[in-house]
Image: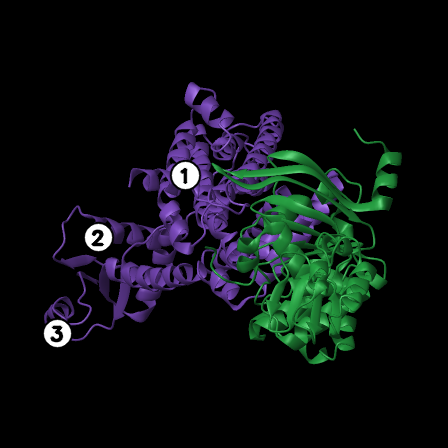
Chain colours: A purple, B green
Amino acid sequence: MTARHLISSAFVIGRRDFTATVFSKSFLFFLLGPLFPLLVGILFGGIGASVANDAERPLVAVLAPSADYARLQIAHDQVAKAVDGSIIRLQHVAPKSDLATQRKALLEARETPARAVLESPFGSPRLTGSIQPDGSIAGQVQLILAQARADSAPALAVTRIETEGRTTASERVLVARAGQALLFLLTLLLAGMLLSQLIEEKSNKVIEVLAAAVPVDAIFLGKLFAMLAMSLLGITVWASAAVAGIALLLPGAPGSLPEPALGWPAFAALCAIYFAMSYLLIGSAFLGIGAQASTVRQVQTLSMPITMAQVVIFAIASAAAGNLNGTTGLIAAVFPLSSPFAMVARAAESDAWWPHLLALAWQLLWVALILRLAARFFRRSVLKSGPAGRPWFRRRSAAAV
Amino acid sequence: MRTLLQQVQHSGEFAIEADDLVKDFGDKRAVDGVSLRVPTGTIYGILGPNGAGKTTTLRMLLGIIDPSLGTRTLLGHGRPLDAAAEVGYLPEERGLYPAMTCREAIAFMGALRGLPIKEGRRRATEMLGERGLADWTNKPIRTLSKGMAQTVQLLGTLVHHPRLIVLDEPFSGLDAINQEKLEALIRQQADNGATIIFSTHVIAHAERLCERIAIIAAGKVAFEGAVDEARSRLRPIVHLRTRSNDGSWRAALPPDARQTGSDWTFELPSSGPEPLLRALIDGGAGIETLSIERPGLHDAFVAIAGESAAREMNGEQPE
């Protein structure tokens, strides 16, 4: 059995699995599944934010002629831009003869009552309302008035220079943790599917045909890479949707993110590679464990302890963020299953490349080892006729009865 | 380590060689010292009742499971999977992906054995068309009946033109017409030079098709050799009807000859038919009819494997 034969056999298995999955109706739901909460979140978040934004900004009615209000509005916009935040809203109201009645009506209006009423802004400004004299609303009105009066002041000369090392270490730890969390979430969601990958072959008796024609290692390898390809396809779709969504709804937001130590392109590439490694490592273990199960019920029973084990692995890797060269950080980087998570953190925090090359070689070695062990275990415990075919996780309970 | 020359010589004479194969499942010994030689280009049958170890033996020969003890070579390869491209296998428990179309299923099975997928699709279309099944080409497997699916799987077993075809209980689940068709297909493959080995618990199929057989009972080979050799283990049976009821001719009959009226049934004496005939004529038996019947494979099976195994073969409960 040559490596070429192993790879070509794995390709045949993988191609069947990939096409059977991707060209099924359920794959559309798989792709759309994560987008639904995202879309709902963006939609309701956007509406909510907009409503909250408008509702939270106090309204100040301006009883003044139109020309005065126009000056005031220009100043308001300048101040709002300068402070990069939300400030009071202004509402123009043309003054009438009975100002006292008009003021009262504005403050006591049933719908959108004014928090305060500003009169005569460029004469003897007067602000009336249920506000503190030294509070935020009074202060903002004072600032807008000052800006409106000082519009003839000389323009400020600004010189822009590029600076190195803008991103602080603590900001990079945040990126590291975010990267780890994303990697964990994707692995948790996607690698779990491998638990049930051999159920179809076992229930349809196809496994006998496969095992007579190709090595079990090739079956495992083919299934693993088919599901990895399917997952990467899904991630590409989701990432594209997320990028498009951010570009449409939050323009300029990516620029405010702290930059990882290796830079964004390298960090993104390493995230993709470490996702693949994490998927292969955890997935090969899942495939081996799931291959022992004969029914969906057995897979469901297995999935809970496995998810908990994943959480523990993530916790170890998470503790390594911000402590890359400490004992925890090194253990997390060396332990094969947590290594991809720990190395993503390193990519965010350290600009050295060689640890990544070393880690990838180490992780690949473990993928091969776990696959080999899982295939051997499968051959011994499942792929045989006769009375000893009981899965390992059922033997003890049966013996205890 | 077998030399290349040894492999070539060996594969030329025997498609399969197995020596003292043993398979244990826990405490149970499923196969106990099975040895086989399947000559290249022959149709070879493995006979035995259910649970005799036929399927386990085939699975060991194919490398699906490893023997606990013993060795086997398949087309000269010590590791059976190395010969996978030249082997076709129809397992006892048929299995296909239900969502696949017939053409894809056949092409996929060929691809597993190294046939390029495009060529597999072309051959699948051709094979279905030759059998008047062109309508099935794009039908999903799940829409087929069990017998139809079995036909598709058989075509998938043959699509890559294997030199060795291994069929585990190929006739089970087929109606009489399809059994005949399958027999014809097996003969056709043998005529094309393929070696065929199949297991069955129906003696008639083996009797009609096989040149050589192995009779397996309780995990052991009770007989291995040519079908004629198995039959020749039994003496021919003489059926005699006489006009005379008594006389000196009766001394020519063996002591265990069974009488029913004027009919007699007994094994042909070792001296052959001529002395018997002379004694009957000279003794005044008045021969009305006399026939010498060659024993069938079923009789040979009973003699070799025992009554109990024969009853199990016929689907009866053992005593």
Report the residue marked by disc 1: A310
Q: Could you tell me which secondary element the residue under label 3 belongs to?
A: loop
The x, y position of residue A283, in whole percent, is 51, 43
Kindly identify the residue that appears in the image at 34 percent across and 68 percent down: A67
Q: CA distance from mark 3 to mark 2?
A: 25 Å
Q: Is residue B143 above or below residue B45?
A: below
The amino acid pointed to by label 1 is Gln
Q: Is residue B83 above or below residue A316?
A: below
Q: Nearer the viewer, mark 2 or mark 1?
A: 1
Circle 1 packing at 10 Å, graded few (<14), some (14-19), many (20+), is some
The amino acid pointed to by label 2 is Ile
Kindly identify the residue that appears in the image at 33 percent across and 62 percent down: A50
The x, y position of residue A307, in whole percent, is 38, 43
Report the residue marked by disc 2: A137
The amino acid pointed to by label 3 is Asp
Q: Quadrant of residue B185?
A: bottom right
- Mark 2 chain: A
Q: Which mark is residue A99?
A: none
Q: CA distance from mark 1 to mark 3?
A: 72 Å
Q: Do the residues at pointers 1 and 3 share their chain? A: yes
Report the residue marked by disc 3: A98
Q: How many marks?
A: 3
Instruction: State which tag comes first along the sequence, 1 or 3.
Output: 3
Instruction: State which tag comes first along the sequence, 2 or 1.
Output: 2
Q: Is residue B57 above or below residue B90?
A: above
Kindly identify the residue that appears in the image at 45 percent across and 52 percent down: A294
- Mark 1 chain: A
Q: Could you tell me which secondary element the residue under label 1 belongs to?
A: helix
- For the residue pair A183 and A133, the one nearer the viewer reads as A183
